[in-house]
Image (cartoon, rainbow, N blue to C red):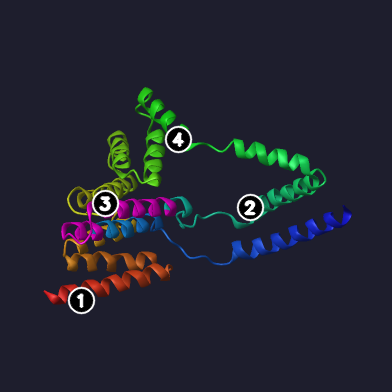
Protein backbone atom coordinates (compact mmCIF):
# COMPACT_ATOMS: atom_id res chain seq x y z
CA UNK A 1 0.00 0.00 0.00
CA UNK A 2 2.88 2.39 0.76
CA UNK A 3 4.30 1.71 -2.70
CA UNK A 4 0.94 2.57 -4.26
CA UNK A 5 0.83 5.80 -2.26
CA UNK A 6 4.28 6.78 -3.57
CA UNK A 7 3.24 6.00 -7.14
CA UNK A 8 0.06 8.08 -6.85
CA UNK A 9 1.95 11.01 -5.33
CA UNK A 10 4.52 10.93 -8.14
CA UNK A 11 1.74 10.87 -10.71
CA UNK A 12 0.13 13.88 -9.03
CA UNK A 13 3.34 15.93 -9.14
CA UNK A 14 3.89 15.04 -12.79
CA UNK A 15 0.32 16.02 -13.62
CA UNK A 16 0.64 19.41 -11.89
CA UNK A 17 3.87 20.16 -13.76
CA UNK A 18 2.26 19.26 -17.09
CA UNK A 19 -0.87 21.23 -16.23
CA UNK A 20 1.18 24.32 -15.39
CA UNK A 21 2.95 24.18 -18.75
CA UNK A 22 -0.27 23.66 -20.72
CA UNK A 23 -2.17 26.49 -19.00
CA UNK A 24 0.62 29.06 -19.10
CA UNK A 25 1.68 28.57 -22.72
CA UNK A 26 -0.03 30.79 -25.33
CA UNK A 27 -3.25 29.47 -26.83
CA UNK A 28 -5.02 30.19 -30.09
CA UNK A 29 -8.07 32.46 -29.91
CA UNK A 30 -11.21 31.25 -31.60
CA UNK A 31 -14.66 32.76 -31.42
CA UNK A 32 -16.29 31.23 -34.46
CA UNK A 33 -18.46 28.49 -33.02
CA UNK A 34 -17.31 25.17 -34.56
CA UNK A 35 -20.84 23.83 -34.06
CA UNK A 36 -22.06 26.47 -36.51
CA UNK A 37 -19.37 25.44 -38.99
CA UNK A 38 -20.41 21.80 -38.65
CA UNK A 39 -24.01 22.83 -39.25
CA UNK A 40 -22.99 24.58 -42.47
CA UNK A 41 -21.23 21.46 -43.71
CA UNK A 42 -24.41 19.49 -43.02
CA UNK A 43 -26.47 22.16 -44.80
CA UNK A 44 -24.29 21.83 -47.91
CA UNK A 45 -24.72 18.05 -47.87
CA UNK A 46 -28.49 18.40 -47.52
CA UNK A 47 -28.61 20.79 -50.47
CA UNK A 48 -26.53 18.37 -52.53
CA UNK A 49 -28.81 15.38 -51.93
CA UNK A 50 -31.90 17.57 -52.47
CA UNK A 51 -30.53 18.52 -55.89
CA UNK A 52 -29.85 14.87 -56.68
CA UNK A 53 -33.44 14.01 -55.75
CA UNK A 54 -34.77 16.74 -58.06
CA UNK A 55 -32.64 15.41 -60.90
CA UNK A 56 -33.82 11.82 -60.22
CA UNK A 57 -30.29 10.66 -59.44
CA UNK A 58 -31.55 9.11 -56.19
CA UNK A 59 -34.92 7.79 -55.04
CA UNK A 60 -37.05 9.32 -52.30
CA UNK A 61 -36.16 6.42 -50.02
CA UNK A 62 -32.44 6.92 -50.64
CA UNK A 63 -32.86 10.64 -50.02
CA UNK A 64 -34.53 10.05 -46.65
CA UNK A 65 -31.83 7.59 -45.61
CA UNK A 66 -29.03 9.99 -46.59
CA UNK A 67 -30.79 12.87 -44.86
CA UNK A 68 -31.08 10.84 -41.65
CA UNK A 69 -27.38 9.89 -41.82
CA UNK A 70 -26.37 13.55 -42.21
CA UNK A 71 -28.56 14.64 -39.29
CA UNK A 72 -27.30 11.83 -37.06
CA UNK A 73 -23.69 12.69 -37.92
CA UNK A 74 -24.25 16.35 -37.07
CA UNK A 75 -25.96 15.44 -33.80
CA UNK A 76 -22.90 13.41 -32.81
CA UNK A 77 -20.57 16.30 -33.70
CA UNK A 78 -22.64 18.75 -31.66
CA UNK A 79 -22.40 16.49 -28.63
CA UNK A 80 -18.66 15.96 -28.93
CA UNK A 81 -17.42 19.46 -29.86
CA UNK A 82 -17.48 22.61 -27.80
CA UNK A 83 -16.75 26.24 -28.59
CA UNK A 84 -12.99 26.91 -28.41
CA UNK A 85 -13.28 30.53 -27.32
CA UNK A 86 -10.65 31.24 -24.67
CA UNK A 87 -11.83 33.00 -21.53
CA UNK A 88 -9.54 35.35 -19.66
CA UNK A 89 -8.93 33.61 -16.36
CA UNK A 90 -6.19 33.82 -13.77
CA UNK A 91 -4.04 30.81 -14.76
CA UNK A 92 -2.48 30.41 -11.34
CA UNK A 93 -5.92 30.22 -9.73
CA UNK A 94 -6.93 27.57 -12.25
CA UNK A 95 -3.78 25.56 -11.54
CA UNK A 96 -4.37 25.74 -7.79
CA UNK A 97 -8.01 24.66 -8.00
CA UNK A 98 -7.33 21.82 -10.43
CA UNK A 99 -4.34 20.63 -8.42
CA UNK A 100 -6.46 20.40 -5.27
CA UNK A 101 -9.16 18.58 -7.20
CA UNK A 102 -6.70 16.09 -8.69
CA UNK A 103 -5.02 15.56 -5.34
CA UNK A 104 -8.35 14.70 -3.73
CA UNK A 105 -9.17 12.41 -6.64
CA UNK A 106 -5.86 10.60 -6.24
CA UNK A 107 -6.39 10.00 -2.53
CA UNK A 108 -9.95 8.82 -3.10
CA UNK A 109 -8.73 6.44 -5.79
CA UNK A 110 -5.97 5.25 -3.50
CA UNK A 111 -8.39 4.36 -0.73
CA UNK A 112 -10.86 2.79 -3.17
CA UNK A 113 -8.15 0.42 -4.37
CA UNK A 114 -8.03 -0.79 -0.80
CA UNK A 115 -11.76 -1.47 -1.07
CA UNK A 116 -12.66 -2.55 -4.63
CA UNK A 117 -16.23 -3.35 -3.66
CA UNK A 118 -16.80 0.26 -2.59
CA UNK A 119 -15.48 1.47 -5.93
CA UNK A 120 -17.80 -0.88 -7.82
CA UNK A 121 -20.78 0.30 -5.77
CA UNK A 122 -19.91 3.95 -6.45
CA UNK A 123 -19.63 3.27 -10.18
CA UNK A 124 -23.01 1.55 -10.16
CA UNK A 125 -24.58 4.50 -8.35
CA UNK A 126 -23.11 6.96 -10.85
CA UNK A 127 -24.43 4.99 -13.81
CA UNK A 128 -27.95 5.04 -12.40
CA UNK A 129 -27.77 8.82 -12.03
CA UNK A 130 -27.21 9.47 -15.77
CA UNK A 131 -30.18 11.44 -17.11
CA UNK A 132 -32.42 9.78 -19.71
CA UNK A 133 -33.11 12.38 -22.39
CA UNK A 134 -36.31 10.58 -23.41
CA UNK A 135 -37.63 11.26 -19.91
CA UNK A 136 -36.07 14.68 -19.36
CA UNK A 137 -37.30 16.19 -22.64
CA UNK A 138 -41.04 15.64 -22.00
CA UNK A 139 -40.59 16.94 -18.46
CA UNK A 140 -38.91 20.11 -19.77
CA UNK A 141 -41.68 20.63 -22.33
CA UNK A 142 -44.30 20.20 -19.61
CA UNK A 143 -42.55 22.74 -17.38
CA UNK A 144 -42.46 25.24 -20.24
CA UNK A 145 -46.20 24.79 -20.76
CA UNK A 146 -46.71 25.82 -17.15
CA UNK A 147 -44.11 28.59 -17.29
CA UNK A 148 -43.88 29.73 -20.94
CA UNK A 149 -41.70 32.74 -20.08
CA UNK A 150 -38.81 30.61 -18.78
CA UNK A 151 -36.08 31.82 -21.13
CA UNK A 152 -33.41 29.43 -19.84
CA UNK A 153 -35.81 26.53 -20.29
CA UNK A 154 -36.49 27.48 -23.90
CA UNK A 155 -32.76 27.87 -24.54
CA UNK A 156 -32.10 24.40 -23.14
CA UNK A 157 -34.93 22.95 -25.21
CA UNK A 158 -33.62 24.63 -28.37
CA UNK A 159 -30.10 23.25 -27.90
CA UNK A 160 -31.45 19.79 -27.11
CA UNK A 161 -33.53 19.72 -30.29
CA UNK A 162 -30.46 20.80 -32.30
CA UNK A 163 -28.41 17.97 -30.80
CA UNK A 164 -31.18 15.50 -31.62
CA UNK A 165 -31.36 16.72 -35.21
CA UNK A 166 -34.92 18.01 -34.75
CA UNK A 167 -34.23 21.28 -36.52
CA UNK A 168 -37.80 22.45 -37.11
CA UNK A 169 -38.55 22.06 -33.39
CA UNK A 170 -35.26 23.81 -32.56
CA UNK A 171 -36.21 26.69 -34.85
CA UNK A 172 -39.60 27.06 -33.17
CA UNK A 173 -37.97 27.02 -29.73
CA UNK A 174 -35.41 29.66 -30.72
CA UNK A 175 -38.28 31.67 -32.18
CA UNK A 176 -39.90 31.59 -28.74
CA UNK A 177 -36.65 32.79 -27.12
CA UNK A 178 -36.42 35.53 -29.73
CA UNK A 179 -39.96 36.65 -28.94
CA UNK A 180 -39.21 36.75 -25.21
CA UNK A 181 -35.93 38.69 -25.26
CA UNK A 182 -36.02 40.50 -28.60
CA UNK A 183 -33.16 40.94 -31.05
CA UNK A 184 -29.85 39.69 -29.67
CA UNK A 185 -27.00 38.69 -31.94
CA UNK A 186 -26.35 35.23 -30.49
CA UNK A 187 -30.06 34.33 -30.55
CA UNK A 188 -30.50 35.60 -34.10
CA UNK A 189 -27.51 33.52 -35.24
CA UNK A 190 -28.73 30.37 -33.47
CA UNK A 191 -32.22 30.85 -34.90
CA UNK A 192 -30.78 31.37 -38.39
CA UNK A 193 -28.71 28.20 -38.06
CA UNK A 194 -31.74 26.15 -36.98
CA UNK A 195 -33.85 27.64 -39.78
CA UNK A 196 -31.22 26.80 -42.39
CA UNK A 197 -30.94 23.22 -41.17
CA UNK A 198 -34.74 22.83 -41.10
CA UNK A 199 -34.86 24.05 -44.71
CA UNK A 200 -32.26 21.62 -45.98
CA UNK A 201 -29.36 24.09 -45.98
CA UNK A 202 -31.17 26.99 -47.67
CA UNK A 203 -29.60 30.20 -46.32
CA UNK A 204 -31.74 32.66 -48.26
CA UNK A 205 -34.88 34.49 -47.13
CA UNK A 206 -35.41 34.56 -43.37
CA UNK A 207 -31.98 33.06 -42.63
CA UNK A 208 -30.26 35.86 -44.52
CA UNK A 209 -32.41 38.54 -42.84
CA UNK A 210 -31.67 37.16 -39.37
CA UNK A 211 -27.93 37.25 -40.07
CA UNK A 212 -28.18 40.83 -41.37
CA UNK A 213 -29.89 41.83 -38.11
CA UNK A 214 -27.18 40.10 -36.08
CA UNK A 215 -24.44 41.98 -37.93
CA UNK A 216 -26.29 45.27 -37.50
CA UNK A 217 -26.27 44.64 -33.74
CA UNK A 218 -22.68 43.35 -33.66
CA UNK A 219 -20.79 44.39 -36.82
CA UNK A 220 -17.71 42.39 -35.78
CA UNK A 221 -19.50 39.21 -34.76
CA UNK A 222 -17.27 36.56 -36.32
CA UNK A 223 -19.88 33.82 -36.62
CA UNK A 224 -22.43 36.15 -38.21
CA UNK A 225 -19.85 37.46 -40.70
CA UNK A 226 -18.81 33.93 -41.63
CA UNK A 227 -22.37 32.73 -42.13
CA UNK A 228 -23.62 35.75 -44.05
CA UNK A 229 -20.63 35.38 -46.37
CA UNK A 230 -21.73 31.80 -47.02
CA UNK A 231 -25.26 33.06 -47.61
CA UNK A 232 -23.99 35.61 -50.14
CA UNK A 233 -21.94 32.88 -51.79
CA UNK A 234 -24.93 30.51 -52.05
CA UNK A 235 -26.93 33.31 -53.66
CA UNK A 236 -24.08 33.96 -56.16
CA UNK A 237 -23.32 37.39 -54.69
CA UNK A 238 -19.62 36.61 -54.68
CA UNK A 239 -18.46 40.19 -54.24
CA UNK A 240 -20.32 40.63 -50.94
CA UNK A 241 -19.18 37.17 -49.81
CA UNK A 242 -15.56 38.19 -50.37
CA UNK A 243 -16.07 41.50 -48.55
CA UNK A 244 -17.56 39.75 -45.50
CA UNK A 245 -14.77 37.15 -45.35
CA UNK A 246 -12.09 39.79 -45.77
CA UNK A 247 -13.60 41.74 -42.88
CA UNK A 248 -13.51 38.59 -40.76
CA UNK A 249 -9.82 37.72 -41.23
CA UNK A 250 -8.29 40.50 -39.03
CA UNK A 251 -10.80 39.67 -36.29
CA UNK A 252 -9.42 36.13 -35.95
CA UNK A 253 -5.76 36.83 -36.68
CA UNK A 254 -4.56 34.21 -34.18
CA UNK A 255 -6.71 31.43 -35.63
CA UNK A 256 -4.49 30.31 -38.51
CA UNK A 257 -6.55 27.23 -39.33
CA UNK A 258 -9.82 29.11 -39.83
CA UNK A 259 -8.05 31.91 -41.73
CA UNK A 260 -6.65 29.30 -44.13
CA UNK A 261 -10.15 27.92 -44.71
CA UNK A 262 -11.54 31.42 -45.31
CA UNK A 263 -8.81 32.25 -47.82
CA UNK A 264 -9.69 29.09 -49.71
CA UNK A 265 -13.33 30.18 -49.78
CA UNK A 266 -12.33 33.66 -50.98
CA UNK A 267 -10.31 32.08 -53.78
CA UNK A 268 -13.32 29.98 -54.81
CA UNK A 269 -15.57 33.07 -54.72
CA UNK A 270 -13.12 34.99 -56.92
CA UNK A 271 -13.05 32.14 -59.42
CA UNK A 272 -16.86 32.04 -59.54
CA UNK A 273 -17.04 35.83 -59.85
CA UNK A 274 -14.62 35.82 -62.80
CA UNK A 275 -16.78 33.26 -64.63
CA UNK A 276 -19.59 35.81 -64.94
Q: Tag 2: Cα neighbours inside 10 Å, few (<14), some, or many (≥20)?
A: few
**Measured along the vertical axis of the image, is residue 78 above or below residue 119?**
below
Residue visible at 66% across and 50% down in the picture: 97
Quarter occupied by residue 15: bottom right
Residue 186: image x %, image y %?
A: 34, 47
Q: Earlier in the sequence, mark 4 or mark 3?
A: 3
Q: Residue 93 — which label?
A: 2
Q: Residue 61 — which label?
A: 3
Q: Residue 134 — which label?
A: 4
Compare residues 85 and 145 and report the one nearer the observer.
145
Asked if marks 1 and 2 touch (Cβ < 8 Å), the reply is no
Residue 177: image x %, image y %?
A: 32, 37
Residue 69 inside the magenta-drawn segment: yes
Q: Which residues are magenta?
A: 48-77
In whole angstroms, how far apart are the C-alphas of marks 1 and 4?
Answer: 48 Å
Q: Tag 3: Cα neighbours inside 10 Å, few (<14), some, or many (≥20)?
A: few
Q: Tag 1: Cα neighbours inside 10 Å, few (<14), some, or many (≥20)?
A: few
Residue visible at 31% across and 73% down in the picture: 264
Secondary structure under the numbered disc 2 in the rendered image: helix
Secondary structure under the numbered disc 4 in the rendered image: helix
Q: Residue 271 — which label?
A: 1
Amino acid sequence: MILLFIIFTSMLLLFIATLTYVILKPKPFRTIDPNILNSKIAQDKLKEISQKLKEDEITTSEYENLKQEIQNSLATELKNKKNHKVQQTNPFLVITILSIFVMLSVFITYFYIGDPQQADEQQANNSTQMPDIDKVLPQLIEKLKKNPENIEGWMMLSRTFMQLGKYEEAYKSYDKVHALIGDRADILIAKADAAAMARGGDMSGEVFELLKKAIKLEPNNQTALYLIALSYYDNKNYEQAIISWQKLIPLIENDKETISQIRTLIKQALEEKNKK
